[in-house]
Amino acid sequence: MMKTRKTPIALQRLFRLSLIALTLALLPVSFPGMARAAQPAGKVDAVAGQVTGAGADGAIRTLAKDGPVFSGDIISTGPNSRVRIVFSDEGIIFLRPSTRFVIDSYKHTGNTQQDESTFSLVKGGFRSVTGAIGQANKDKVRIETPVATIGIRGTDHEGRFCAGDCLDLTNIGVSAPPDGLYTATNVGQTVVGTQQFGPGQYGFTTPARVTVRLPEPPPILTMDPSLRGGLAPQKGTESKDKSAPASEKQGDQGEKPEQKQAGGQEKQSEKTGQSGQAGQGEQSGQGAKEGFEIPAQPPTTRAVQCQ
């Protein structure tokens, strides 16, 4: 009879360890999302008040300065709270109080064909400056809203969606406007729905998804102290808001005497609005004015009736 040779125990253990190592090595290939999940999309540059991030796994965490944000996160700001996020491509997103914003899909590898930056504004308002992804491939950056898609064409722009919740500026004389999406293009170009907007142009999209150009800037954007101060750098750091000098230059060249007077009133309103929120929950170690102020001023603040 033939005798069966037994495999040495040491060899069996080595074989098992080899299988485990091979399985772990193949996991990123089989599930590429797992490899990307560990890479932050960006980090919190400044924060005030209560701001949370809900991950793709449903876990909710409090966002603090220098904390990471990831693709799939749902960012929520509480009342009197705000946050500025700088992404890995140097793009900037600022969220005003009572905002819900989703990082739907973010990928930045340097490959202009594969990189993308897709967000969703669920409620509230934002201000944004395009980063390297949008500068290399403009079609790869967009912001979805409940009534329209905002396409980016290399820009500094802002928007606010009102759905019966735009009453927070009544203390500085801004009445709640009709429901819908209000957008402003400060530098560059944006496409809202099928309408294209250039520097200094404003748009309104109705709940029925009809986008029109506004003849006057909407106060819900231009008199909002949070949006006016959303992109300034921290004290002692270099500004990433490359559009600020251009905005100031346009304001100096194009202002009429009556507009300058209106601008002075707005500056006073902004100062009042900021002083009421300054320092509340500021985790950056500096005042809200230092962390969020921006010198840009809107050309006018007359109310607009939207049908």
Image (cartoon, grey):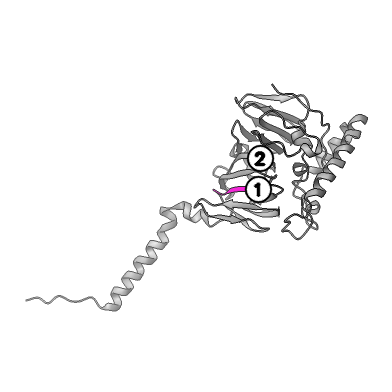
Q: Quadrant of the N terminus?
A: bottom left
Q: Which residue is mark 1?
A: 77
Residue 75 among those drawn in magenta: yes
- Disc 1 marks a residue whose amino acid type is Thr
Magenta residues, start to end: 72-77
Residue 16 coordinates in the image, percent (x, y): 32, 70
Q: Quadrant of the C terminus?
A: top right
- Disc 2 marks a residue whose amino acid type is Gly
> For the point 66% across and 53% down, which residue is it?
50
CA gap, disc 2 and disc 1 = 9 Å
Report the side of 177 relative to 55 (left or right): right
Q: Which mark is residue 120?
A: none
Q: Is residue 295 visible?
A: no
- Please tell me which residue lies in front, 264 or 3: 264
Q: Which residue is mark 2?
A: 124
> For the point 23% across and 75% down, which residue is it?
7
